[in-house]
Amino acid sequence: MTLSTLVPPHVAWQTGALKNGPVIRKTTDIAALAGVFADTKSWQRCEPGQAVYDVDVLQTETCEGALFTGVTHVHPGRVGDEFFMTRGHFHARREQGEVYFGLRGCGLLLLQNERGEARVEIVTAGSVHIIPGYTAHRLINTGGEILSALAVWPTVAGHDYATLSDGFSVRIKTDGTGWRAEASHD
Ligand code: S6P
Ligand code: ZN
């Protein structure tokens, strides 16, 4: 009998570094996040090439039932009072969920349903976040170190950024030592 033995991809739990697999990295810089942060004047003063977050995704075949695995690294930083964060999205296939696992750093996972009701979960090394379908999600780095989280999601899920082009209903800002939540559209 011949049994093939493959070396699987590997994630370093302390850093989120992926190896042993074809990985595609996408970096999102400040310039790409026009309209995402509330304080436009502070956003204009930022270095345009400043990286806000990197996403590494293992290349995977895409079909119904297949899963993507990726790591998001959100850099520490702020635009005005607002912490660096991902753009945030619903899945294009709304019923599709996702799981995030905190790896390092500290931050928040902002979740929002289709009625605009938001909640947050605290992300730390080892935290597990089950994102149901019909739920938009955004990672926010409230700490001084890189925030890294592993995610697994269906390859058919897709991204819908347009529905939240006016932003989430809540913004997370510094209160000097920690964070505070502020309603966006008051
Ligand atoms: C994909 C998953 C993550 C995000 C990444 C960047 O479903 O939720 O890989 O794509 O955290 O966030 P965004 O909102 O820019 O796609
Ligand atoms: Zn997602």
Image (cartoon, grey):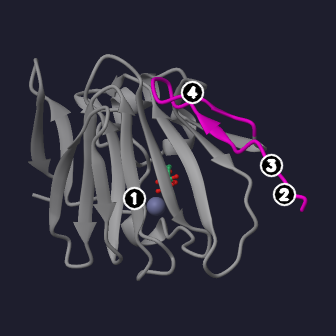
Type of amino acid under label 1: Val
Look at the image and give the residue range highlighted in magenta. 1-20
Residue 13, which numbered label? none
Type of amino acid under label 3: Thr
Asked whether the beta carbons under mark 1 and mark 3 sit within 8 Å of each other, the answer is: no
Q: Which residue is mark 2?
A: 3
Q: How far across and how far down the image is residue 134, in percent?
A: 33, 77
Q: How far across and how far down the image is residue 151, in percent?
A: 47, 51
Q: Quadrant of the C terminus?
A: bottom left
- Quote the CA–CA distance across marks 1 and 4: 31 Å
Asked whether the beta carbons under mark 3 and mark 2 sit within 8 Å of each other, the answer is: yes
Quick one: label 1, few (<14), some, or many (20+) residues within 10 Å? Answer: some
How many numbered marks have been drawn onto this rendered protein structure? 4
Q: Which secondary structure lies at badge 1?
A: strand
Q: Quadrant of the N terminus?
A: bottom right
Can see residue 184? no
Q: Which residue is mark 4?
A: 48
